[in-house]
Image (cartoon, coloured by chain):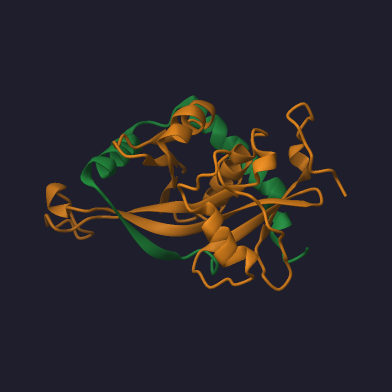
Chain colours: A orange, B green
């Protein structure tokens, strides 16, 4: 068993990562701390993990992946395909599929939504978030045979978007005033 | 794979968010994005077979 007392001085080996579709009958994960280092859980990641993965229940629609680093379970993420609309469609003139102009019609934007991302506190700062983004973006491209999926997106804190997801991985983010933002990147 | 991934949900964004995302999609893909997506394809191909039912 590989030691989990890792420090940033130990080189992280991305070849040790494994992404598995969560199967509650086969995968029994331990209790893991997914909260922020200050104990906060603004994206309800810990709550999600305890309710839908640790408990062994899998009664949500989205697909859940659990992540191993060599022998250790270190994280998870859940994904779904979603359609994006504007709340007030009358403000966005659109044409329907027949070319008829109808101010109430919207052509939705299809996106791969990463609903939750959890990385064990002890494995932060190894760039695991980047590998999750690479996996999800690669997956989105692999299943996008009809080119309907335009984006990968997820909700995150403005702080993480500003400090990590935009500068390191070029994920744009919405400029809302709240604490949470949508981070997004196109696929094709 | 296709059975696993079907559209199941709708998200309603406020208009500013919706416009920001659509304006972004109208722009040409830039070289850094292209590089990331190439890396993503390679990474996914390398790891997609992890995703079986094995422990």
Q: Left or right: where does residue A174 sit relative to residue A167?
A: left
Residue A175 in picture, x, y percent from top left? 31, 34
Q: Left or right: where does residue A5 sit relative to residue A137?
A: right
Residue A66 picture location, percent across and down: 66, 56
The quarter holding residue A78 reads bottom right
Of A86 and A124, nearer the camera is: A124
Asked whether the viewer can see residue A147, the reply is no
For residue B18, what is the image quadrant?
A: top left
Taking A76 as reference, is A176 above or below it? above
Q: Is residue A2 above or below residue A167?
A: below
Seen from the viewer's position, the closer of residues A163 and B11 is A163
Q: Is residue B45 visible?
A: yes
At x 49%, y 28%, the residue is A163
In the depicted view, which residue is nearer to us: B50 or A44? A44
Report the label total. 0
Extreme residue toward the right, this view: A1
């Amino acid at each position: 068993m590989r030691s989990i007392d890792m420090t940033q001085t130990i080189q992280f080996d991305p070849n040790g990562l494994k992404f598995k579709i969560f199967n509650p009958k086969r995968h029994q994960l331990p209790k893991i701390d997914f909260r922020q280092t200050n104990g906060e859980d603004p994206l309800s990641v810990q709550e999600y993990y305890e309710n839908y993965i640790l408990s062994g229940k899998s009664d949500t629609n989205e697909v859940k992946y659990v992540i191993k680093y060599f022998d250790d379970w270190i994280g998870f993420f859940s994904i779904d395909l979603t359609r994006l609309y504007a709340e007030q469609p009358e403000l966005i003139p659109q044409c329907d599929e027949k070319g008829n102009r109808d101010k109430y019609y919207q052509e939705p934007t299809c996106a791969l939504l990463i609903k939750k991302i959890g990385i064990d506190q002890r494995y932060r700062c190894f760039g695991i978030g980047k590998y999750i983004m690479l996996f999800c973006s690669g997956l989105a491209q692999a299943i996008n045979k009809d080119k309907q999926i335009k984006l990968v997106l997820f909700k995150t804190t403005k702080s993480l978007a500003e400090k990590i997801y935009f500068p390191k991985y070029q994920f744009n983010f919405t400029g809302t005033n709240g604490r949470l933002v949508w981070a997004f990147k196109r696929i094709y | 794979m296709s059975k696993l991934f079907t559209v199941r949900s709708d998200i309603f964004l406020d208009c500013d968010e919706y416009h920001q995302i659509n304006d972004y999609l109208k722009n040409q893909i830039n070289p850094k994005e292209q590089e990331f997506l190439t890396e993503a394809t390679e990474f996914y191909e390398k790891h997609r077979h992890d995703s079986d039912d094995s422990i």
